[in-house]
Amino acid sequence: MNSSYLFSILATASIFTLLALSLNIITGYAGQAMMGIAAFFGIGAYTAAIITTHDGNFLLALLAAMIVSGVFGAVLGVISLRLQADFLAITTIGINFVMAAVFNSLKITGGTLGLTTSKPVIFGLKMNNMYFFIFTTILIVIVCLLITKMRHSWFGMALASIENDPGAARSFGINVSKYQILAFIIGTALAGLTGGIYSHRMGFISSTDFAFVVSIQIVSMCVIGGLGTLRGPIFGAVVLTVLPEVLRFADNYRELVYALLLVIMVRFMPEGLLGDDSPVWKFLVGLFRKIKPRKKTRADLIAEKAKAGEYELSGEGGQA
Amino acid sequence: MFTQQLMNALAIGSVYALTAMGATLIYGILGILDIANAGAYLIGAYLGWYIYYGTGSIVLAFVLSIVAVGILGILIQKFIYSPILAKPNTLSIIPLVAAVGLFTMSSDLVRLICGPYSLSYNFDFGVTSIKIGPVVLVPAWILIFALTAVLLLILWIILNKTKLGLAWRATANDPEIAKVCGVNTNNAMALSYILGYGFAAAAGIMVGILYNSITPALGEVPSYKMLAIIVLGGLGNPLGTVLAGLIIGFTEVFLSAYTSIPIPKDAIAFVVLIIMLLIKPEGLLGQKNKI
């Protein structure tokens, strides 16, 4: 395998990883049924492409892509307050179709001809697949760190409570509307950023790049890996990008195998291969524990001592 | 000209209503957005074609195709959807993902088995057109009107006049309470699928005759347009679905006949849907608490 082919796959995989992570914020953490992430991916892609074709700076174009996509996301967030579960899923599917139609007919987006972008230069480096891969991977690391931080912040906990039960969250005084809209803004802004990278890495975009099928692929990545975890979407995105390449010899049956895997997955393991409740993940964690046992906490030590009969567990046990 | 467009809109609207009826019945009971219904529509159209060319009888094609696809529906419900729904804490998009997978599988299987090219029904009505005053009627439209009316009547009788229909309505209303009252909810689910997939198969054959061409991509447009129609009709409400199908049919025909809007015809349904949802989020005839 030559290295340019390898880096082309890696660049694609990293871009879809970032996109899957953006969907995961909305659907995994905030629990909102988002089936049209490709629309926001597209908004970002076209925004950035239009700016750089008018001699704008690439990094500034990415920032603009984030902002424009985030603004559209805020609007959807407000709409999402009125719609629940299935209605929201269908509305987002609808937004995806309408946006794809808009990309295909507006003059500024190049209509059916699409837009051609030139390879950007960052810090004197002309971006090729390898640099795109490195650039996107750095972004993935930053996003993962931010998400981990977010999960342990008040915002992250509020999102988790909304995902669990919006009614109960509201009764505890959590401003559900605010956090829900915020989740949409963050998720769609990240999707927009990914779109900006995508349009420059591809060199050419047209409306078919942002069709509903793409949204389904991203949802599949999250679901197969495990929604609501960090490892899940990353794993799913890498597997679903590499799998079609591996199956290239059976090109005719590729779609069928892909669909079959999807059905088998959601039928037997809806929590995803690496989801928190998945048997695969539990097995891996168990294996890891055997190799490297968890550092004993004070509670474990007390429990062990109690088992050995060194002292009775009573009210004063806490003093030991 | 206007009456002509009206008849055209009515024909397209009827097909939409019939196509979306299957998804509505299934949503009414299981709460699944069953995109795979468009797969049933596709398989129905192909099965119908083979039976029609094997036996030469269009009636046999309709009946056998409806029955076979209906049975397929029960199998899918028993072995795929029910186990998924039985798991606790299933996210609402999980069944939808399963449906998308099933739909893709059906399209691809049809492509691999029957070939990627288009097939023609070449059904001969005996007359090419019927003139009533200024209106020219295509015989295929009359077939569609008649069949839609008959199928909807059968549906109405089953749902309103039979015990099974009573069980269906009870289950749709509240599955827990229905179960407590001794209703066999499994039967109601099976009824949803046999009717739902059967209707889709009938719609597939009708579209095959109307446009005289079936391809493995036949289900792609209905797969999502169907969703817009069932939501517009209030999710799980059969009467609302008929109304919504007609509204979308009329909007599409009249907007593309009398205006030059830049969005493609197939996206209109969703524009109508999004506008409507913002004004009335529970759908045309939906109850507020039933989501």
Image: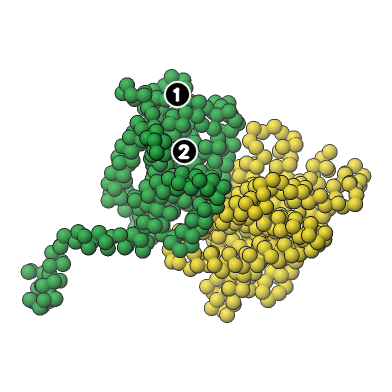
Chain colours: A green, B yellow
Q: Chain of mark 2?
A: A
**Mark 2, other Cα within 10 Å: few <14 / some 14–19 / many ≥20:** many
Q: Earlier in the sequence, mark 2 or mark 1?
A: 2
Residue for point 79% across, 45% down: B8
**Amino acid type at mark 1:** Ser
Which of A33/B219 is in front?
A: B219
Quarter of the picture containing the N terminus of chain B is: top right
Relative to B149, A260 lies left or right: left
Query: Is any atom of residue B38 visible in this view?
Result: no
Which residue bears the numbered disc 2?
A: A41
Does residue A235 sit above or below B198 in this rendering?
above
Q: Is residue B116 among what the camera can see?
A: yes
Where residue B66 appears, as percent x and y from the top left, is: 71, 63
User: From the viewer's perspective, is B151 left or right of A147?
Assistant: right
Q: Which mark is residue B14?
A: none
- Asked if badges 2 and 1 are on one and the same chain, I answer yes
Coordinates of residue B51 in the picture (x, y in percent): 76, 60
Residue placed at 11% from the left, 76% from the top?
Answer: A308
Q: Residue at x 39, y 39 (%)?
A: A1
Mark 1 — residue? A118
